[in-house]
Image (tube, rainbow, N blue to C red):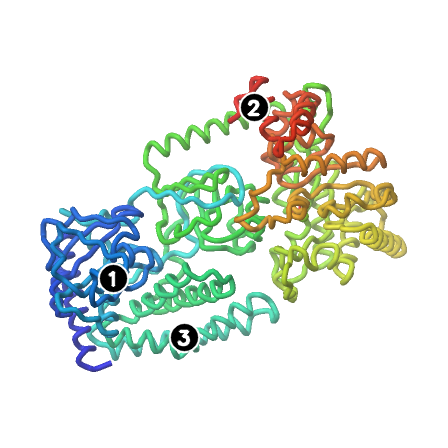
Amino acid sequence: MADGLESESRKLLGRLRDTMAEQAAGQERLDKITHLTADSMGTEVCSIYLFRDSETLELCATQGLKAESVHQTRMKLGEGLVGRVARTGKTVNAADAPSAPGFRYMPETGEEIYSSFLGVPIQRLGEKLGVLVVQSKQAREFTADEVYALEVVAMILAEMTELGAFVGEGAALTRRHTQPVMFRGATGQEGTAMGHVWLHEPRVVVTNLVTDDPETERERLRKAVDDLRVSVDQMLEGADSGGEEVQVLEAYRMFANSKGWLKRMETDIDRGLSAEAAVEKEQSTARARMSQVSDAYLRERLHDLDDLSNRLLRILTGQGRETGSEMPEDPILIARNIGPGELLEYGRSLKGIVLEEGSVGSHAAIVARALAIPLVIHAARVTNEALNGDHIMVDGDQGIVHLRPDDTVVAAFRDKIAMQAQAQERYGSIRETKCVSADGCRVELHMNAGLMADLPSLVNSGAEGVGLFRTELQFLIRNQMPRRTELAQLYARVMDAAQGKRVVFRTLDIGSDKVLPYMKPQDEPNPALGWRAIRVGLDKPGVLRMQLQALIRAAQGRPLTVMFPFVAQYSEFADARAEMDKALAREERLGHPIPSAVEVGAMLETPSLAFASSKFFEEVQFLSIGGNDLKQFFFAADRENELVRRRYDTLNASFLTFLESIVTRCRESGTRLSFCGEDAGRPIEALCLAAIGIHTLSMRPASIGPVKSILMRTNLAEVKAALDAARNRGDQNLRGAVMDYLRENGWAVA
Ligand code: PEP
Ligand code: MG
């Protein structure tokens, strides 16, 4: 770039900085910026359009258009050229604007005399704030240098907005991070919580945006990038080879050594940006790209670049993760994503969790579920908006988050929490009561668990036992394979805490969405249908054997119940059972006490097992339906895919009929049957499962009260009759019939 242009650009940025430093009201500053920009770029017009709300842009300052149109002219997102820039986040450069696609003439502005148009988005870290426009009478396309210069001004504007430079009297903008915002995400873990924001990664605040001394800034940047490279290399040396962490660090190293990245930032510095501002400009570009890329791998790499930019900013500003702020009362953790180990470190101190990413089956979600902390995932942009200490409400049932809620929302939310507390009190009164339906059918209610931390719930919830102990959590939260003695101690503590109540230990269920950090990841085209659970256990039996030994030793002569996950055919069960028998014989030989009774069962998670031979049903001591997996395979609808996971109802006639056929087979063979998927914890679903004859349900502890309450007050035979009648009528979905039945019987159901 020509030296002249560079110094022009630096001059403009210097004047912008002076504007920021002056004591002035927000509107005055905006006006001055339009004036300076038009002057510097040699255009007749410069205008700033900012978002009034998420859909509407408003002309907030102008040099050249009619002054009376300021704060009057508004347009919708996508409307006209300005709306187009805002919607797409892309620059529009038109020599003959009136003939450009989408042009819309705003008569009150007097813009009809201007031919050329250059509009760039004002955005900060991927968040859209407005549009900056220059126009001139002369019909000409703007040069690449001019486009770049305007983009830099837009970036400074975005940073100034963040710093609150445009608020005050006659203000164009209200102060940022003060307004109520609602985020609509998805449910990761049900439950509600109210508290204050605690950012997992506090934002880096950049206050020096502009420089007159590019040499020094270049030097600072180079030094920081050098430090960054060294720290990435050190992290790589310390990482376990082959793990996912190494892949991420390799990507970090690649970016940290990228000449293009450094070059772009240096060019920004030459144009007048400080080293920090140059890093942020690159980061913003990457974030904007991130929102448009659908390829998961590329998105991950852009995330890596984003993380790396944060690290670089921390080096440059000296701001660490520790900001000195204290964790607020009732902390609600806000993060883009978080690993299971980090989440466990926070433990139960958290009242709620909100993630921008995550998935229902992610390790973090599994831990949140185990800790019974309400979790909302896919809350886009929440880390941009939230500030430490902000008031926040998390509705894990609806997947909604209210940040800085206004009084009416707070009141409604408080009512909801109070109603839930009342209900909990009611449930408390029936905690010790065995669950028997109104027509005398006994239904056993057990709880699902996976961590030692879950065990106190066995007493608090009134569960009759642990119907599913997911042993993989102990493997997922570590950086290396746990040892046999460690596992034996843990399982023994679980049995101690259960005080003689039955605990069904499910052997390691890994693969698919649950990938161990220290296991070589398999490159599988479709992991949910891939090498997972018992398939891994049988093909590489070392871990399965170690786990069975640990379980036998933990029992110390007490009864032991073991369940194998994801059994798709009889031989898999027979082989796993044989491993159990071998382990028992070996332990006996070694002189260890043998459990007083051993029960071995399987999870029914693939439709194939429902059609296995009678011999299998006779041999297996119990079956537990893993409804989460069974449903995804029955409907061929990925349980992790937001596009399809809610598409098919559990109360779909086909699925219920299928479940009923499993009940029949188990009855014929006298096989004990239970259901341990998430649906067991949903009152209406639980009612239907019990009505069709599944009389043992295992669920998260918080669901036991609501499920017990509805079961005890309902006549299961009548529910069954309502289901049958609807099915005979040809209803595809039987939910309506159950809801009608409940309404007719005095339940206030929606
Ligand atoms: C299931 O599939 O329903 C189940 C209980 O197992 P998981 O959710 O752990 O796959
Ligand atoms: Mg499963």
How far is disc 3 from disc 2 in space, using C-alphas?
A: 59 Å
**Tag 3's secondary structure?**
helix
Estimate the x, y position of residue 109 in percent, counting from the top left: 13, 53
How far is disc 2 from disc 1 in space, using C-alphas?
A: 66 Å
**Circle 3: residue type:** Asp
Kindly identify which residue carries mark 1. 100
Kindly identify which residue carries mark 3. 227
Dot 1 crowding, Cα within 10 Å, few <14, some 14–19, many 20+? some
First in residue order: circle 2 vs circle 1: 1
First in residue order: circle 3 vs circle 2: 3
**Circle 2: residue type:** Arg
Quarter the N terminus occupies: bottom left
Task: Give the residue at x 12% y 70%.
Answer: 42
Mark 3 or 2: in front is 2
Dot 3 crowding, Cα within 10 Å, few <14, some 14–19, many 20+? some
**Tag 1's secondary structure?**
loop
| 457 in relation to 323, above or below | above
| Frontmost residue, 515 versus 111 | 111
Mark 2 or 1: in front is 1
Task: Give the residue at x 48% y 48%.
Answer: 377
